[in-house]
């Protein structure tokens, strides 16, 4: 399965990319998008919303399911990827390019998995 | 085929109303709409043919076998329709004086008495318009009951994970927290898990019996006792009452409140998705909380009364009245014996089909079923790639409405078959032959089934496209 | 005894044998003995069709069918074109289930798509669902669309229908959300009171247009006030009135709801009716219930399908914002056929005639001493008038097979809510006026 080395992962299938200014980008892993199937809608949080790790952050919708996306780390939303509102299929096409939200004041990075550990977790499922 | 807006011709229309015989005063411009609505301009002939064509693209119970599990698609008797269309029922105003509506009130009163006898309940409201609406109402009764007793910590409703989706959704709407408990493999309640889940915060349990896989939960008395012992109440989802009416009563199983689906069990039609009717019956302890008004009899006269501690209204007026008229005509036709006979034959037809298909298809549960049974297409899918969906679409080409697909969620590749009692042995035998033929096709020529349906007005649809780019109206 | 079971006794025996049972009792033999009913149901014996007909006709005959009706108050007697009943009696529409199997349900699906289009046209809104139970529950569902974590309180006009007010209150009580009533002044929502009730906890303001007493609200101003404070604006409308009145969209509504009964549905002692719901594009993923969308099949043919289903209870379960499952499909079909038969001109004509007859009625009534209108301001096809002896007037009208207006109580005790539609001829109105005049001693 596809899980780039430079990213961190949560067991709930979100990826986290650390940026130079200390903020992070968050998206859905390749496995998540493949399990969900064709996505038709993304319900993004508002800029300024704050989350603790494991809070429900937003949800994504396929034809037959709505799935919550959990915050893999704590933080405050500083930006959302509005292009996904019109083109949710970008998540299916390019899961590691199609980030959902950008968080600042990040906490709990140490609890995330690296790519190998994440692949191992997925293997157990 | 064309939408009626596409057939519209400017200047065409029907002649319906006479000229106005009083002067039409002017309304200030600011209160008038700026632009006329874009409604179709059609002759009566155009309209008539349009809808005849649409009817031809719709499969109803009258078009053929409709074994849609958990929906009880039984035959809808014609006498019911005629009786509900009597001017004495259709031309009466909901707010006309009580002494001029004694017949309508008699309908509600008599139907309440009959349905209370069938369910073992003491009182009933007809306000809920559908099953889910009934669930919401019943749960509010439970909430009001605990609140009235000053027991404010009962905030949780226990729902097995095999339940219909409306159960947890209704509980949330009624302000409860949902505690989902895993069912046993056979969809029955796991007694140990239930014991562990109940407590001082339990408001009640929602259950359907027979359960959502069509099996009768033999521990039902123990289940309802566990909830009662913990101080909670038991809610019966009447979706599957057709299997047991006249044979066993929810009230005798330990349930305190039930909703019925008159459009399933009591033969009133589904109308392409409504109107239904979802009356809620309850034991005497919950009667003071029913929505008002309810009908009471005093010295041969019927009166409307609002119960003392009523939860309030859940709908305008008294519910879907003429649907209740149809149910009453059905109950009068059937009588005590006919009601029981219907349940018996519903169960017989289901068991017969299960037996005849069982040698070939994999049954999710290899035991006596009630009015419906669940097959798992998982083994076939592994072997041939043919899914429950593919078999369903193959049935469409044979004039049979498919069973319920992919429900309950606890069975993979589920097809849930509910033949109902109004189907003849010949119809069942023909359907069985079709199912067996499709199984053969799955093995020999799976591509035909992947591509099915072939002979329907349209073929498989792009549902992803519909949801990604919603087009919900004609754009003009 | 009546029965709809086609299997003969011989066939039943054959089938029982096939499943390994000797009797029907054995078929239920696995049920615990204690839950089996050990007696026949206490119901009368079953009847033949002719007996059922006699029994039901006898019950129906205990209802009075008035030849003339001047009562509305949420249920209106408009003329129903003959084609409406013919179309909605077609067995395919009557006996089908919810159109989940789209390939063999294009007829129902297309009829709903057409209904949605017509409701959007009528209200001016962007999106309509496939209908809900009735006008009151539509209002309650609309309120739930507006509630979020921060904004929870609903402001509801005292001039809305009492059943609507009670239904919204019951729903909000269920979910634990507060409701406050905006008082009325001279028969309309009091704008000053509304202004002082608005704060940042308010999620929506709901008014009815025309209101319960038939009066026309200052709909634009209510909307402006609601939006100024960040609340959503819900209007409950009479669909016939939309043939001539400003649309909810033009008044700035975020959600338009109402009872569709006036669109070709008979009075039927209160139901079944239908609730229509339409909203702006911004609320498309919040609107509850079934929605039909256009798509294509594998051959590229245009087709219709239930869509945006991920909002619904069968997928979201306890996270769904509504539990609604059924719509009132056959009633929505009725409304569609009615609107097609009437067309825009016919609908406007029905609205204008109802408006005209009610105004003629009010004018004639005002000539009777003690029968003047209670409120000032514009009204549509209902109005509140005083009456010196309400019970006597109602009894005298009833003797002439006329159902008089609805006697009101509380603050409006001694007043009657009158209604006229295009069905009421000038002659009928004049006759009613004569009866009232006589009773009230003029």
Image (cartoon, coloured by chain):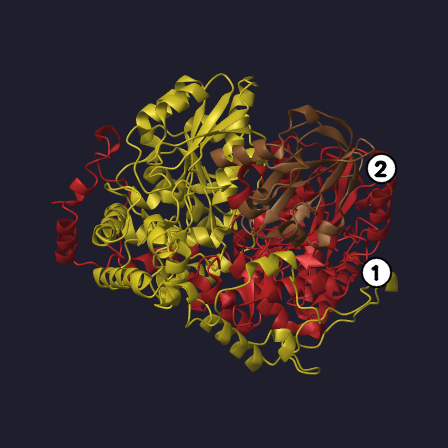
Chain colours: A brown, B yellow, C red
Up the image or down, B308 lies above or below C324; here it is above
Gap between marks 1 and 2, in whole Å? 23 Å
Tell me: C146 left or right of B90. Answer: right
Tell me: C312 left or right of C2. Answer: right
Q: Is residue C197 visible?
A: yes
Q: Which mark is residue C306?
A: none
Q: Secondary structure at mark 1?
A: helix
Q: Position of residue B233 (x, y in %)?
A: 44, 25
Q: Secondary structure at mark 2?
A: helix
Q: Residues within 10 Å of mark 1 (few under 14, many from 20)?
A: some
Q: Residues within 10 Å of mark 2 (few under 14, many from 20)?
A: some
Q: Position of residue C198 (x, y in %)?
A: 83, 36
Q: Which mark is residue B31?
A: 1
Q: Residue at x 55, y 31 (%)?
A: B310
Q: Position of residue C104 (x, y in %)?
A: 45, 66
- Placement of the N terminus of chain A among the 4 image quadrants: top right
Up the image or down, C243 lies above or below B11; here it is above
């Amino acid at each position: 399965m596809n899980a780039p080395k430079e990213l961190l992962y949560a067991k709930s299938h979100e990826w986290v990319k650390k940026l130079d200014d200390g903020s992070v980008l968050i998206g859905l892993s390749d496995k998540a998008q493949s399990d969900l199937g064709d996505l038709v809608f993304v319900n993004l949080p508002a800029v300024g919303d704050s989350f603790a790790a494991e809070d429900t952050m937003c949800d994504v919708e396929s034809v037959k399911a709505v799935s919550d996306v959990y915050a893999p780390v704590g933080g405050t939303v500083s930006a959302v990827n509005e292009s996904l509102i019109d083109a949710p299929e970008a998540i299916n096409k390019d899961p590691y390019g199609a980030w959902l939200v950008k968080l600042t004041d990040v906490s709990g990075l140490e609890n995330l998995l690296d790519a190998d550990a994440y692949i191992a977790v997925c293997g157990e499922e | 085929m064309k939408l009626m807006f596409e057939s519209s011709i400017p200047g065409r229309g029907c002649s319906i109303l006479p000229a106005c015989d009083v002067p039409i005063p002017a309304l200030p411009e600011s209160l008038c709409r700026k632009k006329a609505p874009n409604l179709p301009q059609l002759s009566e002939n155009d309209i008539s043919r349009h809808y005849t064509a649409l009817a031809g693209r719709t499969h109803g119970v009258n078009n053929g076998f409709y074994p849609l599990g958990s929906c009880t698609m039984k035959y809808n008797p014609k006498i019911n329709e005629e009786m509900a269309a009597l001017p004495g029922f259709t031309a009466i105003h909901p707010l006309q004086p009580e002494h001029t509506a004694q017949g309508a009130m008699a309908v509600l009163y008599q139907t309440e008495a009959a349905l209370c006898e069938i369910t073992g309940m003491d009182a009933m409201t007809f306000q809920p318009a559908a099953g889910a609406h009934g669930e919401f109402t019943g749960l509010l009764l439970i909430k009001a009951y605990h609140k009235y007793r000053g027991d404010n910590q009962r905030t949780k409703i226990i729902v097995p994970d095999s339940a219909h989706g409306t159960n947890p959704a209704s509980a949330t709407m009624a302000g409860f927290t949902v505690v989902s408990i895993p069912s046993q493999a056979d969809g029955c309640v796991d007694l140990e898990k239930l014991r562990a889940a109940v407590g001082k915060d339990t408001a009640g349990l929602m259950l359907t019996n027979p359960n959502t896989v069509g099996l009768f939960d033999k521990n039902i008395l123990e289940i309802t006792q566990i909830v009662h012992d913990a101080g909670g109440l038991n809610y019966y989802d009447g979706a599957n009452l057709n299997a047991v009416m006249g044979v066993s009563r929810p009230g005798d199983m330990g349930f305190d409140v039930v909703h019925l689906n008159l459009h399933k069990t009591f033969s009133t039609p589904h109308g392409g998705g409504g109107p239904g009717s979802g009356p809620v019956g309850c034991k005497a302890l919950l009667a003071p909380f029913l929505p008002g008004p309810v009908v009471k009899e005093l010295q041969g006269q019927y009166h409307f009364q609002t119960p003392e501690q009523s939860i309030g209204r859940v709908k305008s007026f008294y519910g879907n009245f003429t649907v209740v008229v149809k149910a009453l005509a059905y109950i009068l036709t059937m009588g005590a014996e006919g009601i029981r006979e219907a349940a018996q034959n519903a169960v017989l037809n289901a068991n017969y089909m299960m037996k005849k298909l069982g040698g070939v298809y994999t049954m999710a549960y290899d035991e006596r079923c009630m009015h419906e049974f669940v097959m798992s297409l998982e083994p076939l899918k592994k072997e041939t790639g043919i899914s429950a969906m593919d078999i369903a679409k193959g049935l469409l080409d044979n004039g049979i409405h498919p069973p319920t697909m992919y429900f309950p969620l606890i069975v993979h590749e589920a097809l849930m078959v509910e033949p109902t009692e109004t189907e003849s042995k010949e119809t069942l035998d023909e359907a069985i032959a079709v199912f067996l033929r499709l199984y053969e096709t799955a093995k020999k020529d799976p591509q035909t089934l992947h591509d099915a349906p072939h002979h329907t007005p349209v073929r498989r649809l792009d549902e992803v496209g519909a949801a990604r780019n919603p087009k919900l109206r004609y754009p003009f | 005894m009546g029965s709809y079971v086609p299997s003969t006794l011989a066939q039943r025996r054959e089938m029982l044998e096939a499943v390994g049972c000797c009797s029907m009792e054995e078929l239920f033999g696995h049920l615990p003995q204690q839950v089996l009913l050990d007696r026949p149901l206490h119901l009368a014996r079953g009847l033949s069709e002719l007996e059922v007909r006699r029994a039901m006709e006898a019950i129906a005959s205990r209802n009075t069918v008035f030849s003339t009706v001047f009562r509305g108050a949420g249920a209106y007697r408009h003329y129903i074109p003959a084609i409406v009943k013919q179309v909605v009696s077609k067995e395919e529409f009557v006996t089908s289930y919810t159109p989940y199997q789209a390939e063999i349900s294009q007829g129902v699906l297309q009829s709903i798509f057409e209904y949605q289009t017509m409701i959007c046209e009528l209200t001016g809104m962007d999106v309509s669902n496939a209908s809900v139970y009735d006008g009151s529950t539509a209002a309650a569902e609309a309120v739930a669309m507006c509630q979020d974590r921060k904004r929870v309180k609903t402001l509801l006009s005292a001039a809305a229908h009492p059943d609507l007010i009670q239904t919204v209150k019951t729903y909000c009580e269920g979910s634990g959300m507060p409701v406050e009533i905006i008082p009325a002044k001279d028969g309309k929502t009091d704008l000053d009171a509304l202004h002082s009730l608005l704060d940042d906890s308010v999620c929506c303001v709901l008014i009815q247009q025309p209101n319960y007493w038939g009066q026309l609200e200052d709909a634009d101003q209510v909307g402006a006030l609601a939006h100024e404070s960040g609340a959503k604006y819900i209007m409950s409308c009479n669909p016939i009135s939309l043939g001539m009145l400003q649309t909810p969209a033009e008044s700035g509504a975020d959600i338009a709801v109402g009872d569709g009964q006036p669109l070709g549905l008979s009075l039927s002692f209160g139901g079944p009716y239908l609730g229509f719901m339409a909203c702006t594009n911004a609320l498309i993923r919040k609107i509850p219930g079934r929605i039909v969308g256009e798509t294509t099949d594998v051959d590229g043919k245009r087709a219709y399908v239930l869509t945006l289903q991920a909002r619904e209870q069968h997928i979201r379960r306890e996270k769904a914002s509504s539990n609604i499952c059924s719509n009132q499909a056959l009633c929505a079909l009725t409304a569609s056929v009615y609107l097609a038969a009437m067309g825009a001109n016919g609908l406007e004509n029905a609205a204008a005639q109802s408006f005209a007859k009610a105004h003629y009625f009010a004018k004639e009534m005002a000539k009777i001493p003690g029968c003047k209108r209670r409120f000032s301001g514009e009204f549509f096809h209902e109005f509140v008038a005083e009456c010196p002896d309400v019970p006597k007037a109602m009894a005298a009208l009833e003797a002439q097979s006329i159902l008089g207006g609805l006697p009101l109580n509380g603050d409006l005790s001694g007043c009657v809510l009158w209604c006229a539609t295009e069905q009421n001829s000038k002659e009928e109105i004049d006759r009613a006026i004569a009866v009232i005049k006589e009773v009230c001693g003029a």
